[in-house]
Each structure stands twice: as structure tokens, then as C-alpha cells.
């Protein structure tokens, strides 16, 4: 008789969803996490709570015509799956033994299943769980500028009312109820080091008990061992997150196609996103695929008030800032702020600089800078209608103002000469020529004097403002950047910020972990980021945003239900 029916490794969103689904199906569950209870919800708690949903009442109210067909078309054109056939390790370089299926075989099927879910059951399921959606839909990842290329054709980034904590809330509550009822037990500060196999079947886990701690959420905790543990179960679900907090692992998995790996990246995730379970799952026989696919941002700034090591915050930019590389060259179209994350990353990695620059002004920052993260958006996180309405007023949000006042990457100046002098103080190794930048900006500013013009970024700003949501709270009217009435001028030094892992443990549509030969590793399941959000790579090469939390919800639900069903 095993110690419990189901073990879930990881108390992040995917683990919580899997655990509560297994409990709902009548199973006894133990949730293990290397962190303390303070970190319940994992990364999702820090998140903005943005969800990829399709053809919703929120979209329709804003005049957006979305459909399953359009979403699927966007998804597959962004994904660019090219590892569908059976081969060896594949370009992801991870499979090891020859396999009957390609690295993308299951990821593509998971993508289709997720789009079905996002266009169908997902919103109703969340509503039943009392999750509410903010009425203004966002337009993330507008893409590479071609109908058949990467990007969202329409706004479909739905922010959860209450952001990440609001999305975690129902699952934390259900888990609490199960805990009180004796159906679910948490084992915090339990780090899994091995999956136990009995006659080829996964029968439990073993690992290290870590020294107790009550450090605040997100702070890196000690790895001091105080003992060992072993626990048996009828099924084990791995929901341990990605690799983004382990910069060495990120660098070693970095693909050549994105240029050289960054030396000075900031971390967009806590240190517990350490990627250890990839190796542990592989040792037990699970197949890791697409490990070279990742989703890192190019608009990272160092947090003036860091919680975790090298803590970076991502700017979710509106389209108006001028983007310069480290040498002061304007980025080519369509690499505008908020358009094509990976295209921009690849471009910047080939410039030879670790940083790039936004140049903007006070008018732009007031409306166009949103900082990613629940703690950076307290109006939404605290569900304050009054404060949220303030977003439509011209004022810098308090969290952005704090960066202007204290962030080491921000320069504010009344004139361009002084601005560039401030920029050069930050990067003396790559001094910029103020005259050249002034010529560039004056030429650009000439383009806003007419309703028409030839500057593609200004056209993109006008297109964005055709969408009511952008016009209301995200995009300023085209205006001369150097207009003193729109000042002062602002420059922001941007770094690469590590965040999401797109590859991972290969799973079938039931969430069962697969071996290199394509067969299931009995009694082992995976969900969330560790599984590339399903199948070992639901996104292919590129993501449409909101698909990470969405992927945790969907893959966690599938794994929890499947594991419970298999136990009978
Ligand atoms: C600031 C921020 C903003 C974001 N915004 C969005 C957004 O708006 N929309 C979106 O879709 N996505 C967003 N994301 C991404 C999304 O939050 C994550 O991809 C997702 O929450 C990952 O959830 P998970 O459950 O798979 O893993 P995690 O949340 O990483 O949880 C995994 C847990 O497993 C534990 N663990 C790991 N290894 C072991 C082990 N060996 N033994 C025991 N325990 C272990 C970890 O301690 C951790 O608690 C954001 C992320 C961040 C950080």
C-alpha cells in the first residue's frame, strides 16, 4: 500500500491545479515543494495573470472579432514546428535514443488542444471558480509584420482581476479545503532528488529535507539539508517549473540561432526556477525535448528593490518608444516595442552589445509603461476599481515612478544633450553620439506633422490607436518626441531578462511522461512549464503571451485528471 495515491512535485500553479483535480476525483494527494508555504503559487503569484483566451465577451465588447480559426492560424504560424518526424535527439539535442516520434509531435497536438480549450471551456471553467477578467483586453506580441508570420492578429491578452494572486486564489482555496479534510497534505522544504522506480514503474520519490525557513516569498532560501525522505505513491506528477532562474543552464541550452548567449542577463524569475527536475526526470527515463527553445525578454530593467538574485522586471511597452541598439542605431521595422520578442532578441544578440535603449518622454511613459508582475500593478492585484480607473488619467503609475526615481537603468533630462550624457555615464564602454541621435529623432519627428507619412513605427502607433483599449490606456497619440511640452526626455537601459522555458519533458495528451522510444514511463506525469506547458513544447519556437498561465491551467488539469483516472 503506497503512502498516498498521487504525489505532486511543485506547489506552483500547475501543481496546485493538478493536485486539486486529483482530489476532486477522490484521490489522496501529497504536494511536495522545496520552498516554504510562503511561496505557494510559485511564479504565478508574481505574474500579471495574463491569459490567452479566444472569442470572449470581453473581446466582443471591445469590437474584436476573434475566432478559433484565427487563433489557431496565429498559433501555428508563430510556433513554426519543424521537428515533427521521428528521429534521434533532434535539433533540440536532448532525446538521446532514437525515437518513434519527433520532438514536436506531441507539442503540436497539445497546442491544438489548448486552443480548443481557450476558445471553448476555459473561460466558463474559470468563471465557475470565481476568477474574473479585467474588461480591457491587451494586445501582446503584435508580431513580425506578415499575415502568415508570428504574432497575435487581434488583442487577446486577458488580465485576471487580481492578477497572479487572483488566478491562484481558487486553487489555493480548494487545496486548503482538501488539507483541512485530510485529502491533501503539503510537504514544504522537501526537495525531490530522485524518482523511484519499482520494476520499471515510477513508484515514488526520494529527496532531501531542507532547513525550515520563513523568509518572505521569492527570496532565495538555503539548500542546507536536515535529513532525507522517501515517499511512495500510485502516481507522480512533476510540476516543477522551468529553468529561467538558473542562468548557467539557460546559457548552456542557448541556441546558436539567437546569437551569443547573454553574459549580463537579469533574472525574471525566482531562484527556485532551477531546472533540476529536467535532469532528474531524464535519469528516470523521461525524454526532454526542445531544450533549446526559450522565451526571454529584451525589455528587462534591474529591480531597484530586488527580491531574488539579479532580480529584473520586464517593461510591457506600448509602441511609441524609440528603440536603439548599444551603438545608437534604431532597430529595423518591425522590431518595435511589444511586437516580436524573439525577433528582437535575435537581432540584439548579434549587435555585440549586452544592452539596448528606449528613448521616450514623460507623455509616453505616463501611458505606455506597464511593468510585468503582480507587485508592480497593485491597483489590479488589490482589485481597486478606483485606482484602476486612474490608468486612463495622465499620470505616471507609482510603480513606474519608483523606477524613474530610483532605478539604476533610468535617465531623465530636459534636453537631448543632457540625456545622452546621462546615458553615456551608464555605458562608458559604448558612448553614443548626441548629434547623431538628435538628427535621427528630428527626422522621425518630421513624420508626425501629417496624418500620413513613411515611418512604419508611426503607422503602427496609428494602427494601435484604432483599437479602443490601446487608445484608452496604452498608446499615446503620435507627437514630436523632442517637443518640450511632452518632456522631460527619458532613456532606459534595457537588458535581456530570462523568463520562460518553451521545451521540456515530453508528454502525451494525457500528460503521461514519455520515454525516448515514445512509450509512456508508467505512473509518471508532467504539467506546466517543466513539460513545456504540455507535450514538451506547446509553443514551438514562439509564444503569443498569456499561454504560460493558460498552459499551466490546462496541462495541470489534464495531468491531475489522468493520473486519478489511471488509478481507478
Ligand atoms: C513576473 C512574472 C510575470 C508573469 N506573467 C505572466 C502572464 O501574465 N501570463 C502568463 O501566461 N505567464 C506569465 N508568467 C509565467 C508564468 O507565471 C509561469 O510560467 C508559470 O506560473 C509556471 O508555473 P509552474 O507551476 O509550471 O512552475 P512554478 O511556478 O515555477 O512552480 C514550480 C514549483 O516547483 C518547485 N520545485 C522545483 N523543483 C523541485 C524539486 N526538485 N523538489 C521540490 N519542489 C521543486 C519550485 O520550488 C516551485 O515552487 C509570468 C512569470 C513571472 C515570474
Image: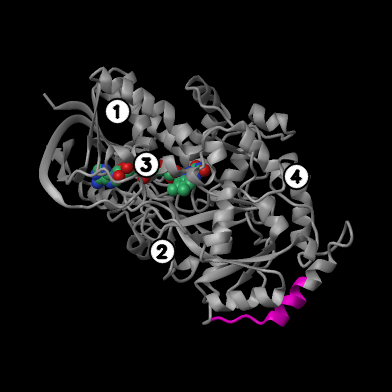
**Label 1 to label 2: alpha-carbon separation:** 33 Å
Q: Nearer the viewer, residue 387 or 135?
A: 387
**Label 4 to label 3: alpha-carbon separation:** 34 Å
| x and y percentages locating residue 135 in the rendered image | 64, 32
User: How many labels, in total?
Assistant: 4
332 falls in the magenta region = no
- Is ligand 1 within 8 Å of the beta carbon of the residue shown at mark 3? yes
Residue 282 shows up from this direction: yes
In the rendered image, the vertical position of residue 554 relative to residue 85, given as above or below: above
Q: Which mark is residue 254?
A: 2
**Between disc 4 and disc 3, whose residue precedes?**
3
The N terminus sits in image quarter: top left
**Label 4 to label 1: alpha-carbon separation:** 46 Å
Looking at the image, residue 248 sits to the left or right of residue 190; the answer is: right
Q: Write down which quadrant ligand 1 falls in.
A: top left
Q: Nearer the viewer, residue 154 or 67?
A: 154
Q: Nearer the viewer, residue 523 or 218?
A: 218
Looking at the image, residue 161 sits to the left or right of residue 94; the answer is: right
| Residue receiving disc 4 | 471
The C terminus sits in image quarter: top left
**Label 3 to label 1: alpha-carbon separation:** 22 Å
| Residue receiving disc 1 | 563
**Label 2 to label 3: alpha-carbon separation:** 24 Å
| Prevailing secondary structure class for the magenta stretch in the rendered image | helix
| x and y percentages locating residue 346 in the rendered image | 54, 65
| x and y percentages locating residue 197 in the rendered image | 15, 39
Q: Which mark is residue 42?
A: 3
Q: Residues within 10 Å of mark 1 (few under 14, many from 20)?
A: many
Query: In what element is the residue under mark 2?
Result: loop
**Between disc 1 and disc 2, whose residue precedes?**
2
**Label 4 to label 2: alpha-carbon separation:** 38 Å
Determine contact: label 4, label 1, CB under 8 Å. no
Amino acid at each position: 500500500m503506497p503512502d498516498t495515491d498521487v504525489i505532486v512535485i511543485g506547489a506552483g500553479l500547475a501543481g496546485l491545479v493538478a493536485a486539486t483535480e486529483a482530489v476532486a476525483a477522490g484521490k489522496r494527494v501529497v504536494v511536495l515543494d522545496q520552498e516554504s508555504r510562503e511561496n505557494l503559487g510559485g511564479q504565478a503569484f508574481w505574474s500579471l495573470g495574463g491569459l490567452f483566451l479566444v472569442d470572449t465577451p470581453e473581446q466582443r465588447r471591445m469590437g474584436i472579432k476573434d475566432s478559433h480559426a484565427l487563433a489557431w492560424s496565429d498559433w501555428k504560424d508563430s510556433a513554426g514546428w519543424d521537428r515533427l518526424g521521428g528521429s534521434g535527439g533532434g535539433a533540440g539535442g536532448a532525446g538521446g535514443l532514437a525515437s518513434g516520434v519527433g520532438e514536436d509531435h506531441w507539442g503540436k497536438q497539445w497546442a491544438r488542444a489548448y486552443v480548443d480549450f481557450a476558445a471553448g471551456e476555459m473561460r466558463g471553467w474559470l468563471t465557475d471558480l470565481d476568477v474574473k477578467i479585467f474588461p480591457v483586453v491587451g494586445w501582446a506580441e503584435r508580431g513580425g509584420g506578415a499575415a502568415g508570420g508570428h504574432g497575435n492578429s487581434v488583442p487577446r491578452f486577458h488580465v485576471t482581476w487580481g492578477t497572479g494572486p487572483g488566478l491562484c486564489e481558487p486553487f489555493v482555496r480548494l487545496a486548503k479545503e482538501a488539507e483541512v479534510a485530510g485529502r491533501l497534505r503539503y510537504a514544504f522544504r522537501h526537495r525531490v532528488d530522485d524518482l523511484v522506480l519499482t520494476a520499471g514503474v515510477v513508484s515514488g520519490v526520494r529527496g532531501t529535507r531542507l532547513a525550515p525557513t520563513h523568509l518572505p516569498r521569492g527570496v532565495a532560501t538555503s539548500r542546507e539539508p536536515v535529513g532525507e525522505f522517501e515517499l511512495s505513491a500510485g502516481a507522480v506528477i512533476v510540476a516543477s517549473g522551468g529553468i529561467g532562474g538558473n542562468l548557467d543552464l539557460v546559457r548552456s541550452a542557448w541556441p546558436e540561432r539567437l546569437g551569443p548567449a547573454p553574459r549580463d542577463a537579469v533574472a525574471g524569475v525566482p531562484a527556485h526556477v532551477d531546472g533540476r527536475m529536467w535532469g532528474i526526470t531524464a535519469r528516470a527515463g523521461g525524454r526532454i525535448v526542445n531544450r533549446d527553445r526559450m522565451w526571454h525578454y529584451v525589455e528587462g530593467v534591474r529591480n531597484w528593490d530586488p527580491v531574488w538574485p539579479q532580480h529584473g522586471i520586464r517593461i510591457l511597452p506600448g509602441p511609441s518608444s524609440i528603440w536603439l541598439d548599444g551603438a545608437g542605431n534604431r532597430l529595423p521595422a518591425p522590431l518595435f516595442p511589444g511586437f516580436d520578442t524573439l525577433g528582437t532578441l535575435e537581432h540584439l544578440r548579434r549587435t555585440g552589445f549586452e544592452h539596448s535603449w528606449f528613448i521616450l518622454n514623460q507623455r509616453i511613459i505616463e501611458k505606455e509603461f506597464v511593468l510585468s508582475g503582480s507587485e508592480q500593478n497593485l491597483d489590479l492585484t488589490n482589485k481597486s476599481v478606483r485606482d484602476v480607473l486612474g490608468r486612463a488619467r495622465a499620470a505616471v503609475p507609482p510603480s513606474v515612478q519608483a523606477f524613474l526615481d530610483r532605478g539604476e537603468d533610468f535617465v531623465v533630462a530636459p534636453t537631448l544633450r543632457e540625456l545622452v550624457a546621462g546615458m553615456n555615464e551608464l555605458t562608458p564602454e559604448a558612448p553614443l553620439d548626441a548629434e547623431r541621435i538628435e538628427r535621427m529623432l528630428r527626422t522621425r519627428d518630421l513624420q508626425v506633422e501629417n496624418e500620413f507619412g513613411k515611418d512604419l513605427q508611426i503607422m503602427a502607433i496609428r494602427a494601435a490607436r484604432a483599437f479602443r483599449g490601446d487608445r484608452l490606456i496604452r498608446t499615446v497619440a503620435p507627437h514630436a518626441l523632442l517637443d518640450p511640452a511632452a518632456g522631460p526626455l527619458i532613456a532606459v537601459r534595457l537588458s535581456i531578462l530570462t523568463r520562460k522555458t518553451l521545451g521540456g519533458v515530453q508528454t502525451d495528451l494525457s500528460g503521461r511522461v514519455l520515454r525516448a522510444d515514445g512509450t509512456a514511463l508508467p505512473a509518471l506525469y508532467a504539467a506546466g512549464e517543466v513539460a513545456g506547458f504540455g507535450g514538451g513544447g506547446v509553443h514551438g519556437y514562439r509564444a503569443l503571451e498569456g499561454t504560460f498561465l493558460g498552459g499551466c491551467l490546462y496541462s495541470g488539469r489534464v495531468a491531475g485528471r489522468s493520473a486519478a483516472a489511471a488509478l481507478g
